[in-house]
Amino acid sequence: MSSSPRSARGITSLSKFAVSLLVAGTAVAADRPAFNKRTGLFEPPFSELERAVARKDRAELGRWAGRFGPSRLGQALRGTDRGHQLAALEAAPLLPGNARLLEAVTPLLEGRDEAVAEAAAHAAGRMLDRTEPGRLADWDIPVDVVTQVCAALATVVSDGQRPAGPRLAAIEARAEAGHRCVAMDASALLFDPVPEIRRAALLVMDMDAEKVAAALADPEPSVAAAAAVATCRHRRGPSPRLREIARAVGTSAEDKAEILPCASGDGS
């Protein structure tokens, strides 16, 4: 006896529901604690790492990062699960020898996922940290790996089609890297349509004195203030424009604290 259209639809719906349960069950099973078949070591589920990230508990995140180790975090970075990638990008910089994961982080910088690219830039900056001179040599990080990540960061910085978040994070990362990254020509950034990009470039990137002086006339108060800060950091003399920016209502208290001493010309 043939089934009615209604009963056929019911069977189809039931089948779809069963498939969805199977998929969900598989996902849950994949995230359960397990033991590595090769090493016999306990492997915690990624949900624990993701929860630590969500709670923004750095100490807890560091503990879980150590339990996951560079191998599993590297697998997550190279994988396709976005949640795992984001969690691994937060955890990886907390590991000793985290620069070993630079090669896995580099491709994520140039991806089109804004959140992943921004997190990757922050992670790369912390891995390249110039304040620890021996960190790359101690772990035998190849020069070409560093060259590639620096080039990827420069590409992100210069790409005006990208959102501001990843670009700002890449500017910060290159500043954290210091001499590890070859200096890039940042002059074009002073004409960027995004004020935050112009400001960041003035504050953390090497700029020609004439270009910094020209930026004092930027119509955006925060950018003009950044140019004044850069002028003062390079110990260039006081000028009427510096005093004008220091007194401007739109200049932040933080910027004024750096501008006022050199604007007065007497260090007061």
Image (tube, rainbow, N blue to C red):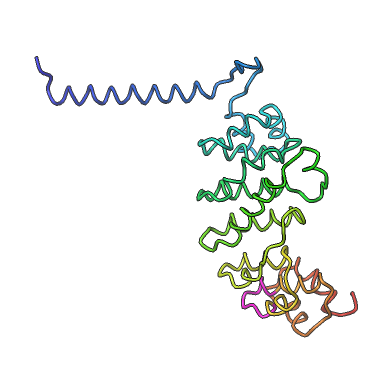
Depicted 25 relative to depicted 129: above or below: above
Vertical placement of residue 109 versus 206, above or below: above
Residue 240 in percent (x, y) is at 77, 85
Q: Residue at x 75, y 78 (%)?
A: 247
The image position of residue 73, as x and y in percent, is 63, 33
Who is closer to the viewer here, 81 or 51? 81
| Numbered circles on residues, count | 0
Give residue 236's quadrant in the image: bottom right
Q: Quadrant of residue 53?
A: top right
Residue 25 in the image: x percent, y percent?
44, 21
47 sits left or right of 19 in the view: right
Residue 226 versus residue 261: which sits nearer the camera?
226
At 54% from the left and 24% from the top, the residue drawn is 31
Q: Is residue 220 magenta?
A: yes
Closer to us: 229 or 105? 105
Q: Which residues are magenta?
A: 216-224
Residue at point 76%, 39% (across, down): 140
